[in-house]
């Protein structure tokens, strides 16, 4: 299995993924890992309509995805793994899956969140989850598209954690 991209994007599959990432990064399968999406048939239908026919879309809950990754179900695949939030990434890592880098592509502003960077709005739960990922030595880079400059968001997240009084 070759994991080409691990990305957090609250919209999951949309234009940036289809027109930007899939045309630049060689993947044959998108794996969405989300308990919420795995239990929402309508959302699954809508997401599958956005994916080109040349790419297979697989939607799994956290437990099943963790099991399948650790048991080489995707051994022959070139994967893009999508999460809608950092908490789900932490749960997958807690299940023994390792990632070197996570792209934060889009966590948009909503009530109760603070905008840290153009594509990154967070609340206390997000910051706590990001601190856990940092503690695992995972790079947290932000960019909307693969041709954009990589920006390491670790210092921004750590600064916000300090402001909020959240300890790693």
Image (cartoon, helix red, strand yellow):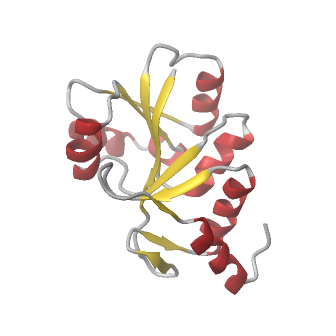
Can you say whether 70 is above or below 106 in the image?
Answer: above
Residue 149 position within the rendered picture, expressed as x and y whole percent measured from the top left = 37, 59
Q: Nearer the viewer, residue 32 or 132?
A: 132
Please identify the residue farthest to the front as the structure is shown. 149
Query: What residue lies at 72% left-to-right and 81% top-to-bottom?
Result: 162
Residue 138 placement, left or right of 106: right
- Quarter of the image holding residue 82? top left
Q: Residue furthest top?
A: 76
Query: Could you say which is closer to the camera, residue 140 or residue 39?
Result: 140
Q: Residue furthest bottom?
A: 163
Front residue of this view, candidates 72 and 38: 72
In this rendering, the answer to whether 7 lies above or below 106 is above
> At 59% across and 49% down in the image, what residue appears?
88
Q: Indicate left or right for 103 with 95 as reference.
A: left
Kindly indicate the quadrant of the structure image that contains residue 132.
bottom right
x, y percentage for residue 50?
A: 22, 41
x%, y% of residue 159? 65, 79
Residue 156 place in picture, x, y as percent:
58, 74
Q: Residue at 50% across / 19% down in the picture?
A: 74
Q: In which quadrant is the C terminus drawn?
A: bottom right
Q: Would residue 99 be found to the left or right of residue 32 on screen? A: right
**Above or below 136: residue 4:** above
Work out whether residue 72 or residue 137 is closer to the camera in this orientation and state it: 137
Furthest-right residue in this view:
167
Quadrant of residue 155 within the rendered picture: bottom right
Name the residue at 31% across, 46% down.
Answer: 13
């Amino acid at each position: 299995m070759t994991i080409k991209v691990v990305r957090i994007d609250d919209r999951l599959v949309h234009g940036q993924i289809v027109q930007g990432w899939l045309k630049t990064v060689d993947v044959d399968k998108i794996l969405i890992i989300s308990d919420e999406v795995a239990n929402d048939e309508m959302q699954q239908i809508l997401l599958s309509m956005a994916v080109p026919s040349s790419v297979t879309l697989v939607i799994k809950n956290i437990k099943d995805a963790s099991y399948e990754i650790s048991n080489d179900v995707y051994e022959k695949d070139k994967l893009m793994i999508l999460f809608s939030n950092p908490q789900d990434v932490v749960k997958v890592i807690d299940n023994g899956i390792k990632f070197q880098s996570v792209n934060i592509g889009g966590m948009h502003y909503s009530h109760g969140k603070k905008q840290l960077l153009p594509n990154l709005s967070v609340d206390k739960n997000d910051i706590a989850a990001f601190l856990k990922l940092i503690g695992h030595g995972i790079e947290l880079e932000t960019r909307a598209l693969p041709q954009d400059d990589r920006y390491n968001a670790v210092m921004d997240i750590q600064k916000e954690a300090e402001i909020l009084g959240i300890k790693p």
